[in-house]
Image (spheres, rainbow, N blue to C red):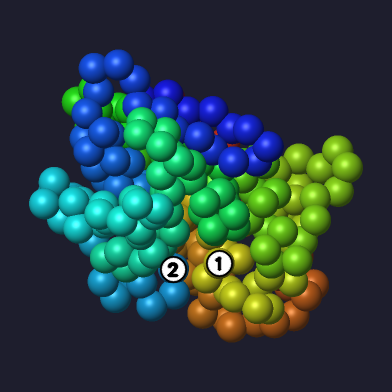
Amino acid sequence: MRHEKIDGVSHVYIEEGEDEHQVLRAIVKASFMLAQPVGMGWINFSKEHQMTDDVADRFITKCDHIVIEMDYVGGRQCKTYLQKIEDGHFTLLNRTYERDRGLPEPLFEKANEILKGKEGEKPVSTSDMYKGDSLTLRLKEYGFTRREGESDWEFRQRIFPDLYQKSPDQAMEFLMGASATEWNDLDKMLCLNFMTEKTKDQSRLKWFAEGFAADPIVMRERCRA
């Protein structure tokens, strides 16, 4: 499977020797694998849940236009819609995907791993959603704009107090640079202890965001190394 972005639209092409249905199934499974719960989605979310081929096929439609249709699946925010342009050529509805999940490149990379039978070789991580253009796209949906020269960590720290006022759970995930499903025990203890304060004081929220020794994403990556 090959993919490229043209004028903001992600195009997917079936390569020689590939089966179209198998490629679509791999995209469905990759979307589910990388998606994380939000809001009430935690009720149905299970980190260990693996999507079978039969279940994946339920999200591949038979219509001539939209061929993959995934909104919330098993508590996960998938937001993945693929439309058919012609045989072997599809496009992603980027706006729908990117506003919640950031750039789709990790999705297509994971789909290719699945096609090659390598989907279990790398741990699933959502950190890409909190970096670079993906971070910029996602925070734009909350009304925040990155300042010129502002790093990812500076951006996440700056918006934390204001976002926390609207959605404490989402704000904490942005600050930590990962879905809560990926927090380690120390992350959980730190965040949950702070959230039990139920503070809305801006100075207190700013103090918390600026009190980290380093970007939590960097600290987690160092621990994995």
Residue found at x 56% / y 49%: 94
Viewer-closest of 197 and 181: 181
The answer to whether residue 208 of the structure is visible from this angle is: no
* 8 left or right of 223 in image: right
Note whether 192 is above or below 136 in the view shown: below
Residue that carries the numbered disc 1 in the rendered image: 170
Q: Position of residue 169 (x, y in %)?
A: 52, 70
Residue found at x 43% / y 48%: 83
* 221 left or right of 114 in image: right
Q: Quadrant of the C terminus?
A: top left
Q: CA distance from mark 2 to mark 1?
A: 8 Å
Q: Amino acid at mark 1?
A: Gln
Q: Residue 129 has which mark?
A: none
Q: Position of residue 130 (x, y in %)?
A: 58, 47
Q: Alpha-carbon neighbours of circle 2 within 10 Å: few (<14), some, or many (≥20)? A: some
Q: Residue 38 has which mark?
A: 2
Q: Quadrant of residue 41?
A: bottom left
Q: Position of residue 194 (x, y in %)?
A: 56, 71
Q: Amino acid at mark 2?
A: Val
